[in-house]
Image: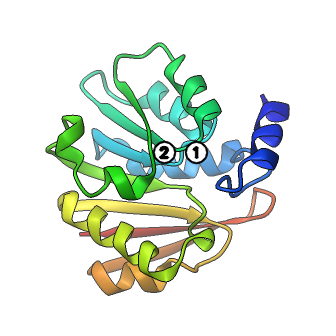
Amino acid sequence: MAINFIKTALTDYRVGALTRSSHFVARRVVQELLPAYRRIVEYGPGDGAITKLLLQQLPADGKILAIESNPDFARGLKNIADVRLQVVEALAQEVSKDFAAFGWQKIEAVFSGIPFSFLNPDLRQRIVDQTYNALEPGGIFLVYQYSTLMAPYLKKRFKKVVVKFEPRNFPPYFLMIAKK
């Protein structure tokens, strides 16, 4: 699986990492989401390292909408046999403007590993704004990245933003949790 991830990362400029997220990062993300949230959107799940762990712990009535732009990763995600997972091959900015078009009226949490550093500032803010608008009151937008680049964008829109650090990944990750 790691070899396929590296191969895909080297051939698709939109993939922002050379290796999949460590199990430490996956556990930290899942700890922030469960058990509080059941209708969860994931931007940029890659090969599903976090998605699979989340599905293992998600209640039976939970749902995940995984938005993946890379065709190889999307195909792999669609092979996960779990009715709680819906995979859409698209860009986050396309889906986040109208989740209802995909049958999602109610969104409690969104988490993202997409490489925001590859996007222009206007697009970064647009994704944050569209995500904010789609979230229910009390919902969260969790962004995990190699830097805190997204913290100011989140703080422009969300009342509360907490930044956490996960050193047990190479390179280490920052988790930015924004609450509506």
Instruction: Locate residue 90: give its quadrant.
Output: top left
Q: Visible in this render: residue 11?
A: yes
Q: Which residue is drawn at 55% across and 71% down?
A: 119
Classify the position of the N terminus by image quarter.
top right
Vertical placement of residue 12 versus 2, above or below: below
Instruction: Locate residue 61: give its quadrant.
Output: top left
CB under 8 Å between discs 1 and 2: yes
Q: What residue did someone put label 1 on? A: 27
Side of 164 relative to 58 (left or right): right
Label 2 neighbour load within 10 Å: few <14, some 14-19, many 20+: some
Q: Where is residue 107 in the image (x, y as percent from the top left)?
A: 22, 48
Q: Residue at x 42, y 82 (%)?
A: 153
Q: Which amino acid does label 1 sit on?
A: Arg
Q: Which residue is drawn at 29% across and 45% down?
A: 37
- Judging from the image, the colouring scheme is rainbow
Q: Which residue is drawn at 72% across and 46% down?
A: 22
Q: Position of residue 109 (x, y in %)?
A: 31, 52
Circle 1 SS class: helix
Q: Where is residue 46 in the image (x, y as percent from the top left)?
A: 61, 41
Side of 107 relative to 77 (left or right): left
Q: What residue did someone put label 2 on? A: 30
Side of 173 relative to 97 (left or right): right
Circle 2 SS class: helix
Side of 77 relative to 5 (left or right): left
Q: Visible in this render: residue 19?
A: no
Label 1 neighbour load within 10 Å: few <14, some 14-19, many 20+: some
Q: What residue type is labelled 2?
A: Val
Distance Cα–Cα, label 1 vs label 2: 5 Å
